[in-house]
Image (spheres, rainbow, N blue to C red):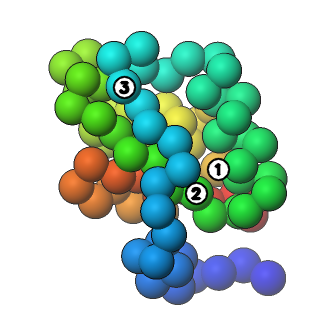
Amino acid sequence: MNKKPFELKREAAHIVPSLNIGKSGITDPLILELRNQLKRNRLVKVKILKTAVDEMDRNDIAKELSMRTGSMLVEVKGNSAVLYLK
């Protein structure tokens, strides 16, 4: 069943970030862990710390996470990005 973006945003409002992206940025181990979480939970919220934003823009970080995990970027809100694996 494919969920609509507004349904995913509603669900994401109730979950806590399970990964933090900090000064190390997007590393291979981080991508591996994110893929595993997406496979288990389908919907994952990632917190983008201020130290990561020094290197890249929040939206660019979220887009790269989506691209490298094969997931859909649901939204970037504040310091969090929500990803969904169909």
Q: Choose mark 1 or mark 3, whichever is in front.
A: 3
Residue 72 picture quarter: bottom right
- The residue at which mark 3 appears reads as 22
Task: Mark 1 or mark 3: name the one nearer the start of the chain.
Answer: 3
Is residue 5 in view from this perspective?
no
Task: Mark 1 or mark 2: name the one nearer the start of the chain.
Answer: 2
Q: Residues within 10 Å of mark 3 (few under 14, many from 20)?
A: some
Spatial distance from mark 1 to mark 2, Cα to Cα? 10 Å
- The residue at which mark 1 appears reads as 71
**In the drawing, does residue 16 fall left or right of residue 4?**
left
Residue appearing at x 42%, y 20% in the figure: 25
Residues at discs 1 and 2 in contact (Cβ within 8 Å) = yes
Please name whichever residue, 22 or 6, is drawn nearer the observer in this view of the structure: 22
Spatial distance from mark 1 to mark 3, Cα to Cα? 21 Å
Q: Which mark is residue 25?
A: none
Spatial distance from mark 2 to mark 3, Cα to Cα? 17 Å
Residue appearing at x 45%, y 83% in the figure: 10
What amino acid does circle 2 point to?
Answer: Val
- The residue at which mark 2 appears reads as 44
* Relative to 60, residue 43 above or below: below
What amino acid does circle 3 point to?
Answer: Gly
Task: Mark 2 or mark 3: name the one nearer the start of the chain.
Answer: 3
Residues at discs 2 and 3 in contact (Cβ within 8 Å) = no
Q: Quadrant of the N terminus?
A: bottom right
